[in-house]
Amino acid sequence: MIDLTFFTLGSISLLAAVVMTAIGLRYAILAERRLRERRKAAAQRMTRTRSDSASVS
């Protein structure tokens, strides 16, 4: 009986660890994607600003 209880608790904690890891990885991937898009947009703004100031000069 006690062995079954520990086995069940161990299984639940292992499952919880796997689920939490999956959620953490998902959020990390989404954050990385957002950061990459933000950097890309900033680089485009810088390029556009440079070309605008070059044409004015």
Image (cartoon, grey):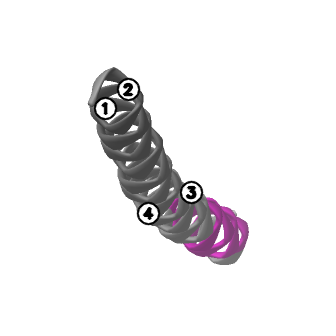
Q: In which quarter of the image is the C terminus?
A: bottom right
Mark 4 or mark 1: whose residue is earlier in sequence: 1
Q: Give the range drawn in magenta.
A: 42-54
Residue 26 badge: 4
Cα distance between the residues tagged 3 and 1? 34 Å
| Nearer-N-terminus badge (3/1) | 1
Residue type beneath disc 2: Phe
Residue that numbered label 1 is attached to: 9
Q: Is mark 3 on a helix, strand or loop?
A: helix
Which tag is nearer the camera, tag 3 or tag 1? 1
Sequence-wise first label, 4 or 3: 4
Q: In this view, does 13 lie to the left or right of 28?
A: left
Look at the picture and state if 15 lies above or below 16: below
Q: From the image, tell me which residue sits under label 2.
A: 6
Placement of 43 over or under 15, stated as above or below? below
Residue type highlighted by circle 3:
Glu
Q: Is mark 1 on a helix, strand or loop?
A: helix
Between 36 and 30, the one lying in front of the other is 30
Q: Which of 42/4 is in front? A: 4
Residue located beneath label 3 in the image: 32
